[in-house]
Amino acid sequence: MLTTAINNKRNKKRNKQPHVTIISGWLIACCLMLASSHSLAQPDKPVRGTQLEVTPERCIALRKGQTCYLEVTFKWQQGESSDYCLINVTRNSVLKCWRNRSKGQYSFDFQSSKSNTFVLRSKNSNVDLAQAHIVVAWVYKSTKRSKLSWRLL
């Protein structure tokens, strides 16, 4: 009787294993399908191998909404020489273009009250090769003055 109970438990374990294998295989297949469809749905992602760095990455203003002033430097590098442009996507403006280069550097005075996104593109293309951000932050969120301020009467 004891051996029958042990054999029944063994048979139940054996019967469960194929179901687990089928379910885990199905989950793996679903994850692979989702991953491939996700990568196909985002063609505007920057191209790997291209580098675009901005220093510094953060600009700090005193109060929210104030313009932040900062001198920033962009450095980029690409695998092959061609014509490239550095573009401020937030303002939709071209900052600098290079001819027949595989790397470059550009410095300018950043002035903005909000964060900006920059991309490196081939001159005659809308494909982003690399992307960088300058985040605008502030020390104080509120512009309200304290009710306990001094007054001259």
Image: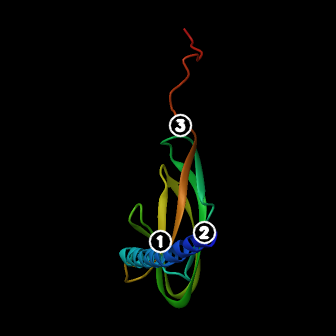
- The secondary element bearing badge 2 is classed as loop
Of labels 1 and 3, earlier in sequence is: 1
Taking the spot 48% from the left edge, 59% from the top edge, the residue there is 116
Residue drawn 47% across the image and 51% down it: 114
- Can residue 45 be seen here? The reply is no
**Residue 26 in which image quadrant:** bottom left
Where does label 3 land, which residue? Answer: 141
Q: Which mark is residue 119?
A: 1
Q: x and y percent of residue 144 in the render?
A: 50, 27
Disc nearest the viewer among 2 and 3: 2
Amino acid found under the numbered disc labelled 1: Val
Callout 2 touching callout 1 (CB < 8 Å)? no
In primary-sequence order, the first of circles 2 and 3 is 2
Give 83 or 20, whichever is nearer the viewer: 20
- Mark in the foreground, 2 or 1: 2
Mark 3, residues whose alpha carbon is within 10 Å: few (<14), some, or many (≥20)? few
Q: Position of residue 38 (x, y in %)?
A: 40, 73
Q: Looking at the image, which residue is at 60% across and 55% down?
A: 58
- Residue found at the very far top of the displayed protein: 153
Distance in Å between CA atoms under marks 2 and 3: 76 Å
According to the picture, the residue beneath numbered tag 2 turns out to be 1
Query: In the image, what residue type sits under mark 3?
Result: Lys
Q: Is residue 82 visible?
A: yes
Question: Of label 2 and label 1, which has the lower sequence position?
Answer: 2
Q: Which secondary structure, mark 3?
A: loop
Q: Amino acid at mark 2?
A: Met
Label annotation for residue 78: none
Q: Quadrant of the N terminus?
A: bottom right
Q: CA distance from mark 2 to mark 1?
A: 75 Å
